[in-house]
Amino acid sequence: MKITFDLSVKLGLIASSLVLSSASYAAGTWLNGDNMLEPGTTIQTINANANKNSYTSNPALDNRAWGMQGAWLNFEVTQASDVLVSLSSAATNAPGFTVYRTDNNFVADPKASGKADKNGTEGAIHAFNQVGQPGKPGLIWATDNDVVDSLEGNTLENGLVETLGYVNGSMTDYVNFWNDNVESGAHDVSIDNKYENGVYGSVQHHAGPDGNTNYSNLTLVNLQPGFYTVFLGGTNTEGEDTPIDIKVTAIPLSIADCLLNYTEQQEPADYPHAGLVSQTFMQYYYRYYAETGHYLGISSEDSHLYSLPQVGGEISDLGDAVAMATAAGCK
């Protein structure tokens, strides 16, 4: 499944005055220093990185990620949302990135986060496994110390918990040092649906009046509250060091989902909040709470909110959904 996300207006700040040379390692920052992501908001960084092969394709590193030459950016999701991560650059570069769930704000500091292990088992920020799971070869140096099945090594507090998805923006499939595929396009590599309910994306090329632009996009469905880290860089060693911009957007909640969330907050005993994805059956837009056996849904026939205690039970009309949504502050 693919999405189309056309950023037709390039920011005027990306001009010839930008330094196009390879960026040295530094902790990334968002514009205005704001890393909080709420529904309906976007955070961004201009020229987050410019290295042409910091994500993959560096032959000297056997296609491992060059962590000190890429960019690391943390963000915090405050409320379950569909989240779009979109990178763009001039066609001379091809953005790539991975999204990780973390225990807290992750600091990819080589002095605090790892050591160079020559056999590659633990990995190191200098050359790590960009598509592997925390606790596995090539990523132990960045793994959170609460990951129970981690290989032995130098794990840390506030480390990576799970790799959710990645995008290789080039047209080339790579195999890294650990024989893991870093395939072209967008990929869901999450272990389960604990932190999201699906990952999909696209790689696109846009020809416009301001020149040719490459985009790498990833959508994480129903991304749960908590901390996340993006590692990004270039994927084409034959290209050029060209600035890569990043935007992360939490798609606004629908009024229906807002009302269902509000009802969960008001009556958690019946409708325990668990980051559920709403479903559609006949005229109902609903959620099922396995813990209590309750159903909660909105009918398209009369725009009322209904509750069903259990299958075979008596359905209850809780009231006009529009009025209730207004009272709940849903817009």
Image: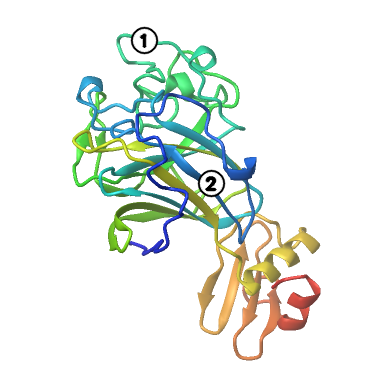
The residue lying toward the viewer, choosing from 57 and 264, is 57
On the question of residue 28 being in view, the answer is: yes
Q: CA distance from mark 2 to mark 1?
A: 31 Å
- Crowdedness near tag 1: few (<14), some (14–19) or many (≥20) residues, C-alpha within 10 Å: few
Camera-nearest residue between 52 and 149: 52
Taking 141 as reference, is 278 left or right? right
Which residue is found at the position 41% from the left and 52% from the top? 218
Q: Residues within 10 Å of mark 2 (few under 14, many from 20)?
A: many
2 or 1: tag closer to the N-terminus: 1
Residue 317 lies, with reference to residue 97, above or below; the image says: below
- Residue at 68% x, 76% y: name it: 313
How many circles with numbers are drawn on the protein?
2
Q: Which residue is mark 2?
A: 195
Q: Quadrant of residue 115?
A: top left
Residue 214 coordinates in the image, percent (x, y): 30, 52
Residue 135 in percent (x, y) is at 44, 24
Q: Is residue 164 rendered to the left or right of residue 265? A: left
